[in-house]
Image (cartoon, rainbow, N blue to C red):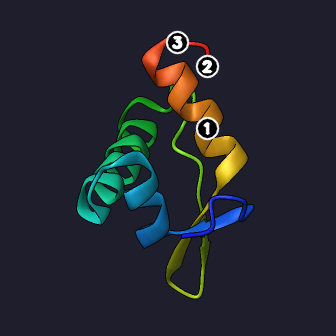
Amino acid sequence: MNINKKLLTLNEASKYINLSEEEILKIIYEEEKQIITSHGFTGRRFPYLKINDKYYVPKDLLDEWIKDASGKSY
């Protein structure tokens, strides 16, 4: 995987953060569910684009999401 890519496929993103594609999709679906049921979401949402039923993840936003989720600065 070219870690200098700006836009990762779901598979590349899963390898980059060491989660399965299913785990990432579960995060996305759970966030969407929370938005629908509670009419809002606090915190940073998992960053993704959906194009023609395929998910893509901007690497720079994924790095920011990791920092926010972990509470760590790298």
Do the residues under discs 2 and 3 have CB atoms within 8 angstroms?
yes
Q: Tag 1: Cα neighbours inside 10 Å, few (<14), some, or many (≥20)?
A: some
Name the mark on residue 63: 1
Q: Position of residue 41 (x, y in %)?
A: 50, 28
Lower position in the chain sequence, tag 1 or tag 3? 1
Q: Which type of secondary structure does the marked residue at label 3 adopt?
A: loop
Residue drawn at (62%, 68%) of the image = 2
Do the residues under discs 1 and 2 have CB atoms within 8 angstroms?
yes
Q: Say which quarter of the image contains residue 57.
A: bottom right
Closer mark to the observer between disc 2 and disc 3: 2
Lower position in the chain sequence, tag 1 or tag 2? 1
Say which amino acid is labelled 2: Tyr
Q: Is residue 42 visible?
A: no
In the rendered image, the vertical position of residue 38 relative to residue 17, given as above or below: above
Q: Position of residue 36 (x, y in %)?
A: 42, 43
Q: Position of residue 17 (x, y in %)?
A: 41, 47
Q: Tag 2: Cα neighbours inside 10 Å, few (<14), some, or many (≥20)?
A: few
In the rendered image, the vertical position of residue 73 relative to residue 67, given as above or below: above
* Closer to us: 30 or 19: 19
Q: Which residue is mark 2?
A: 74
Say which amino acid is labelled 3: Lys
Name the mark on residue 33: none
Image check: 40 left or right of 24? right
Say which amino acid is labelled 1: Asp
Do the residues under discs 1 and 3 have CB atoms within 8 angstroms?
no
Q: Which residue is mark 3?
A: 72
Cα gap from disc 1 to disc 2, whole angstroms: 9 Å
Q: Which of the image's four quarters has the C terminus?
A: top right
